[in-house]
Image (cartoon, helix red, strand yellow):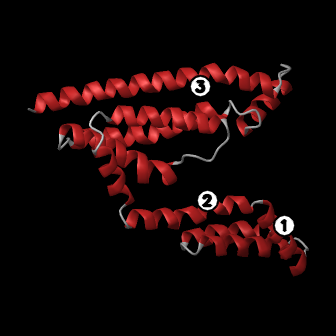
Amino acid sequence: MIKLLGIVIIVIGFILKLDTIAVVIAAGVVTGLVGGLNFGEILDILGEAFVTNRYMTVFFVTLPAIGLLERYGLKERAAELIGKLKAATAGKILSIYMVIRTIAAALSLRIGGHVEFIRPLIYPMAEGAARNKYGDIPEEAVEDIKGMSAAVENYGNFYGQNVFIAAGGVLLIVGTLNELGFQVTEKEVANASIPIAVIAVLLAIIQFRIYDKKIEKIMEGNK
């Protein structure tokens, strides 16, 4: 029972809103000590886990960089750049990103993300295109653009990643099917994912095209 002391520390730490990393490390150290490990062994385990998962910490390095770029006008410059393209619409911007995001996911390239791309770049560009075309747009349209900007990231990532033969989703599908008695390979799953990804891109483009028509009607009705 005392070996569950680490869980108690985590619960109390979260209730008191203490520093998350400090709480987790403290819980890990206490769990190790009550489990019979000495302090040196605990440090070895923590160090090995850090080295194994160090690439995950790179994500956190990008957050302050993106914050600084936004602070010094990244969103405004993105909207201004799109404003110079008279033919650009919110739907076209999102359609182009859908294609790029799906290809990047299929090649397992780290291009995309709600924090890294959608918030600072894609959403301001889509909104800037709509404002450039129609001027002031209603709040309903702004919220729609926000929702679609978030959705396009999910579309591209979800349907594109399984085209990559070594993606986690592909390995999970293969493992699950094999356990159920269906013998498939990673290559077969990846090949089967290609038409699905293409269909997803086409449906997304149609959705964004329909939205362009919708906002056009809304703006005509407001005249």
- Left or right side of 222 for 157: right
Q: Quick check: can you spot residue 183? A: yes
Circle nearer the N terminus (3, 1) = 1
The residue depicted at 87 percent of the width and 70 percent of the height is 35
Q: Can you tell which mark lies on residue 48?
A: 1
- Left or right side of 26 for 44: right
Spatial CA distance of label 2 from label 1 is 19 Å
Please name the residue that numbered disc 3 is placed on: 197
> Which of these two is toward me, 114 or 81?
81
Q: Nearer the viewer, mark 3 or mark 1?
A: 3
Q: Are marks 3 and 2 in contact (CB under 8 Å)?
A: no
Q: Is residue 64 above or below residue 126?
A: below
Quadrant where the image shows the N terminus: bottom right
Image quadrant where residue 180 sits: top right
Q: Quick check: can you spot residue 38? A: no
| Dot 2 amino acid type | Phe
The residue depicted at 47 percent of the width and 37 percent of the height is 97
The residue depicted at 66 percent of the width and 63 percent of the height is 57
Please name the residue that numbered disc 2 is placed on: 59
Mark 2, secondary structure of its residue: helix
Q: Nearer the viewer, mark 2 or mark 1?
A: 2
Image quadrant where residue 217 sits: top left
Spatial CA distance of label 3 from label 1 is 38 Å
